[in-house]
Amino acid sequence: MPKLFYGWVVVGGAFVVLFMAYGTQYAFGVFFAALLDEFGWSRASLSGIFSLYAFLYSVLGLLAGRLTDLWGPRVVIAMGGVFLGVGLAGMSRVSALWHPYLFYGIVAALGMSTAYVPCNATVVKWFVRRRGLALGVATSGGSLGTFALPPAAAALVGALGWRWAYVLFGAGIFLMLNLVATVMRRDPEGLGLSPDGGPRAATATRSSPAEVQWPFRLAIRTGAFWLIFGIFTATWIPVFIPLVHLVPFARDLGIPPLVGATVVSALGIAAAVGRLVLGAISDKIGRKPALALVIALQAAAFLGFTLVGGLSSLYLVAVVFGFSYGAVSTLFPAIVGDFFGREQAGSLVGFLFALAGSMAAWGPLVAGAIHDATGAYTRAFLLSAASNGVALMLLALARPPRPRVAQ
């Protein structure tokens, strides 16, 4: 029986980290409703907490990626477990509006910055031929966490109150991330292996544009790099809107918060399917066609949200959005690795995530302000669909950079 390639152990570790981190992140909508009830703060002010958090952890993705290239993922992910655990546990003590801005918006964001970029950049380094599939399996952890943890949060809030629920979530994150960090390794060469588990000689002689190793300083001078930035900026600006506002949106439709949390879970399952299916398919048909398909689906989902009138249609649209959202976030590090190589994947993914991902922080804030002003999310959803349309136009222009420039 052939020995298991250690890269799949790394994929498993990334799966668990993303399961815990993103499952907890998207339980924010459950706590959002509880905070609204207890303190009566406006939706815009509460959305601002998540916006600060999303902006900061995205910007810090640059540092997390660079540190992953230098130190490896073990140290970086363990540090993240400490910050994220402390930030979530600290939420149990809030009594004024500035408290969640500190504990969640800053401390938890420091921890969250060590999830997406270090995990995905590390998987990129372990795989070339099966990169899409490996990233799909790893990132499906975030989607399954989105399925499992929001209902768990709703149940805990109902049984113990939101303060104790935050304590339990913080302790779980702290323990799991520090445990999983012990199995993470920077790259296959460090264990005397090759990407995908193939013979080292065969891997070394394989030549394709995707395997040209671009130094960071040259990659950021290419038009391809900035087109990727534009594509993911336009795609991600609205991406957190359903994930933050779905439970309040469901409540506006007369759907109880616990049932609304199950809609978030359905979104998470669909995202897991999108990651796995499109990750594997993109290895066969190419990243661009796969990416074009799911960006178009995401635009259609935002238009669908404007037509939702009850629970059944909300489930349907949430599933379409989840499928497309999951696939987009999986194909992002894959296309970066394909265009610029795996040697400095942490720095490149981190830099792009810092620039493009940080823009996603504005989406929930703007959507909350639109709701406060108009009493509905319709305009926010229409603007989100238009933003995805811009991403499709930019994707049509994207091409891998010419290998002759790399040194």
Image (cartoon, grey):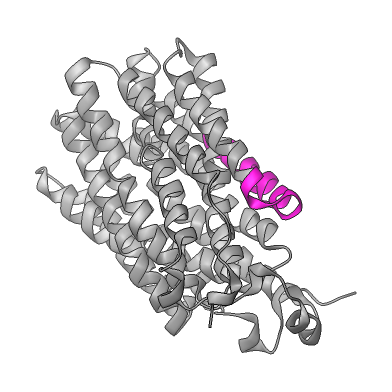
Is 180 a magenta residue? Answer: no
Question: Which residue occupies the extreme top position in the image?
Answer: 309
111 up-or-down from 187: above or below: above
Residue 213, x across and y down, in percent: 57, 77
How many numbered discs? 0
Relative vertical location of residue 262 with respect to residue 305 in this rendering, above or below: below
Residue at image position (24%, 61%) is: 107
Which residues are drawn in magenta? Answer: 266-289
Q: What is the residue that sits farthest to the right in this orientation? A: 1
Q: Residue at x 60, y 58 (%)?
A: 138
**Residue at the spot 45% in from the left edge and 10% down from the top edge:** 309
Residue 174: x and y in percent read 39, 65
In the foreground, 336 or 247: 336
Q: In this view, does 27 lie to the left or right of 3?
A: left
Is 285 within the magenta?
Answer: yes
**In this rendering, would 153 be left or right of 125?**
left
